[in-house]
Image (spheres, helix red, strand yellow):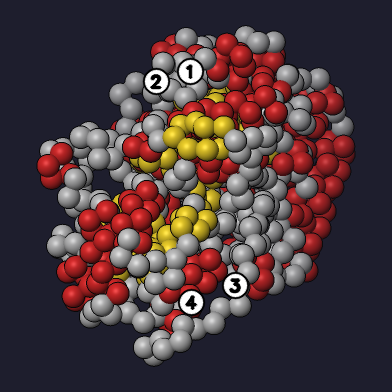
């Protein structure tokens, strides 16, 4: 085992894969800047594999697609997730669709890295969680690792995958340290992790909601309440079986998701459990999400938005009471539903 | 071009024209081409003159009006016609249709229905050739309308900044759908935009396949030798409407304008030149007959091909499909509410 930060895990994954495979290249604005996980890469891999990028998200995303269809494996780093909107046409209309449109003649093996810089007082154009929008686009695999070990193992798997993978990094987790297995550590895409076992309530948590949910589980364990925390890790394809298995055991489900409420990952997870796991449920499902408003600049307002331990805790309490839908929604956070 | 190459050029231009005439006939008679069809008749000189400057392994990216481009690059017409008819044997297995023909076996990296979006992808293909250490060049076709979208500018800038072997070929047919170029650009030259990116910009008579071939060949040689990109503006004309709507409505165009351009038809011009140089008319007639038979065979192939089976709806999305994880033997919770 080695101990490293989430950020260093991302850096290690890219380094290991670039050393392993000369087809891996990095497209990143300011890749040589000291804050970037790619800082120093050009010295080892040269300017062809770490080219200097103009501020041209649409252009270099298109170039990555052309490169991927002709034998390379680009890692495209948008540095801030909102910037991927600038490249939306290339991402949605081309990276996701080209293989299908061309009848399987080609594949588009690109990893799109997107650091989600919310809860950081940067206001709505630098604070976002775009994964639900892309979950609605067939052809993209989507991962949201929450630990350094998964950050490393999923990024390595994503780089080796022959399909486009969008890799969302909650920036607030970058500094978090954890143990990472030695050697060639790969985490399979499409497999959830049981972050903590429990028998009373299932909390499916995404991204930085995972550590928040673990905090709640730790607290409630002192009262004899065993919370099972499931980290899907991959949102497309979603490991529905792991979630259904957990709900079959606990009979209660809370979904904690820092993205917006409407048509979000939490909505999809809730719908699947309602459709396929209805007989297991002993209480209504409760979602703990961000409300459908933009992240405001003022930290005083923004901190109300996301699934804090307090909001997750309230939701767990509510499902344990088998409360009605209205009561559970109210308990899950007074902002919900506005 | 020597006589043999001129005969090759004539054969390819006649193939494109007869292929598209056959497609229009199928559309008109309701015999099985669904959706929109964009005909490039009148522009064959620009298309064939450019593609003949490429090697088979060089890359080519088309756009929405690109039945002719894979034909010029050497693709087999049967699977192209089958694609237009949505058949299982289509070059893209019926997933792409008229606006997304691709034949990777001849370096045709596909076509996009989003104006200008193929331009940066060609840049990426040229970048890929550099990283992989090959001397392949990439050629991007697009229309005059694409010169006003961001992808054009970002693509040209990237290619120039990275000094890549890309040839940008603008088929300037004077109209974006029905909108005249003069109404959407203050400048009267697209080639002049090359200067802003410090690359050569060349205007060429698109009706003269030999002139196009000469200009593009020089650009290809420059690119292959590491001399960087070139923008070629081929002045040409589209005889048909933007798409086939069942009637030929010239929109704002005057019939006299069309007739004027028809006097400089690229196929007629080359045929006359060959006859002037002493080629036997019987040879040219034989060429016409051969091509007519090839196109008839392509149509027969397409019409006799099976439609895709229902399960093909789900095929070609993923290069690496991920199987869902199996459910454990889930036992519903004792005392579940329902």
Q: Is residue B55 visible?
A: yes
The reply to whether discs 2 and 1 touch (Cβ–Cβ < 8 Å) is yes
**Which residue is at a point 42% across and 60% down the rendered structure image?**
A229
Observer-side mark, 1 or 3, equals 3
In the displayed structure, A168 sits above or below A190; it is above
The residue tagged 1 is A39
- In the rendered structure, find residue B327 and report the number of the disc placed on it: 3
* Residue B11 occupies quadrant: top right
- Of residue A95 and residue A227, the one placed in the foreground of this image is A227
In the displayed structure, A246 sits above or below B233; it is below
In the displayed structure, B311 sits above or below B116; it is below
- Calculate the distance from the C-alpha at mark 2 to the C-alpha at mark 4: 44 Å
Left or right position of B55 against A25: right
- Calculate the distance from the C-alpha at mark 3 to the C-alpha at mark 4: 10 Å
Residue B306 in picture, x, y percent from top left: 75, 70
Q: Quadrant of the N terminus of chain B?
A: top right
* SS for dot 1: loop
* Residue B303 occupies quadrant: bottom right
The residue tagged 2 is A35
């Amino acid at each position: 085992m080695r101990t490293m930060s989430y950020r260093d895990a991302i850096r290690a994954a890219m380094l290991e894969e670039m050393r392993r495979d000369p087809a891996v290249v990095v497209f990143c604005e300011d890749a040589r800047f000291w804050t970037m996980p790619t800082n120093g890469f050009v010295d080892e891999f040269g300017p062809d594999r770490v080219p200097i990028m103009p501020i041209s998200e649409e252009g270099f995303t298109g170039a990555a697609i052309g490169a991927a269809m002709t034998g390379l494996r680009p890692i495209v780093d948008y540095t801030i997730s909102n910037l991927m909107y600038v490249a939306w046409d290339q991402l949605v209309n081309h990276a996701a669709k080209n293989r299908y449109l061309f009848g399987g003649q080609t594949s588009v093996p690109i990893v799109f890295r997107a650091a989600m810089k919310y809860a950081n007082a940067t206001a709505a154009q630098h604070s976002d969680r775009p994964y639900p929008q892309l979950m609605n686009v067939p052809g993209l695999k989507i991962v949201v690792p929450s630990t350094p070990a998964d950050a490393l193992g999923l990024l390595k798997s994503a780089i080796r995958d022959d399909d486009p993978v969008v890799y969302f990094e909650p920036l607030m987790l970058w500094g978090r340290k954890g143990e990472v297995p030695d050697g060639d550590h790969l985490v399979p895409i499409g497999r959830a992790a049981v972050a903590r076992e429990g028998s009373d309530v299932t909390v499916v948590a995404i991204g930085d909601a995972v550590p928040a949910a673990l905090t709640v589980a730790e607290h409630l364990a002192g009262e004899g309440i065993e919370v099972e925390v499931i980290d899907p890790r991959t949102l497309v394809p979603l490991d529905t079986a792991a979630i259904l298995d957990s709900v079959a055991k606990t009979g209660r489900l809370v979904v904690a998701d820092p993205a917006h409420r409407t048509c979000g990952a939490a909505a999809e997870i809730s719908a699947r459990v309602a459709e396929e796991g209805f007989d297991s449920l002993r209480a209504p499902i409760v979602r703990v999400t961000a409300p459908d408003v933009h992240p405001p600049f003022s930290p005083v307002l923004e901190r109300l938005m996301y699934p804090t331990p307090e909001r997750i805790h309230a939701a767990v309490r509510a499902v344990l009471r088998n409360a009605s839908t209205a009561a559970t929604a109210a308990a899950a956070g007074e902002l919900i539903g506005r | 071009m020597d006589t043999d190459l001129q005969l090759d050029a004539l054969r390819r231009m006649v193939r494109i024209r007869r292929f598209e005439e056959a497609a229009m006939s199928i559309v008109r008679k309701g015999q099985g081409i669904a959706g929109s069809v964009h005909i490039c008749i009148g522009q064959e000189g620009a298309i064939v003159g450019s593609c003949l400057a490429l090697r088979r392994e060089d890359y080519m990216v088309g756009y929405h009006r690109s039945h002719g481009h894979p034909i010029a690059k050497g693709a087999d017409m049967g699977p192209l016609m089958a694609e237009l008819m949505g058949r299982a044997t289509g070059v893209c297995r019926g997933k792409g249709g008229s606006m997304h023909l691709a034949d990777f076996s001849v370096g045709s990296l596909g076509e996009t229905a989003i104006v200008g979006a193929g331009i940066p992808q060609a840049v990426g293909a040229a970048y890929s050739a550099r990283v992989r250490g090959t001397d392949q060049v990439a050629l991007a076709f697009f229309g005059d309308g694409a010169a006003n979208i961001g992808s054009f500018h970002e693509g040209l800038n990237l290619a120039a900044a990275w000094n890549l072997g890309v040839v940008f070929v603008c088929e300037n047919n004077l109209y974006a759908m029905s909108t005249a170029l003069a109404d959407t650009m203050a400048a009267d030259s697209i080639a002049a935009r090359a200067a802003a990116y410090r690359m050569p910009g060349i205007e060429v008579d698109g009706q003269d396949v030999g002139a196009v071939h000469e200009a593009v060949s020089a650009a290809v040689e420059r690119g292959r030798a590491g001399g960087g990109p070139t923008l070629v503006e081929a002045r040409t004309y589209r005889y048909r409407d933007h798409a086939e709507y069942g009637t030929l409505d010239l929109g704002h165009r005057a019939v006299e304008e069309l007739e004027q351009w028809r006097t400089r038809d690229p196929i007629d011009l080359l045929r006359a030149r060959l006859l002037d140089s002493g080629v036997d008319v019987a040879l040219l007639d034989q060429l016409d007959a051969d091509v007519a038979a090839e196109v008839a065979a392509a149509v027969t192939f397409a019409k006799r091909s099976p439609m895709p089976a229902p399960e093909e709806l789900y095929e070609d999305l993923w290069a690496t499909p991920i199987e869902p994880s199996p459910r454990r033997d889930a036992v519903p919770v004792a005392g579940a509410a329902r």
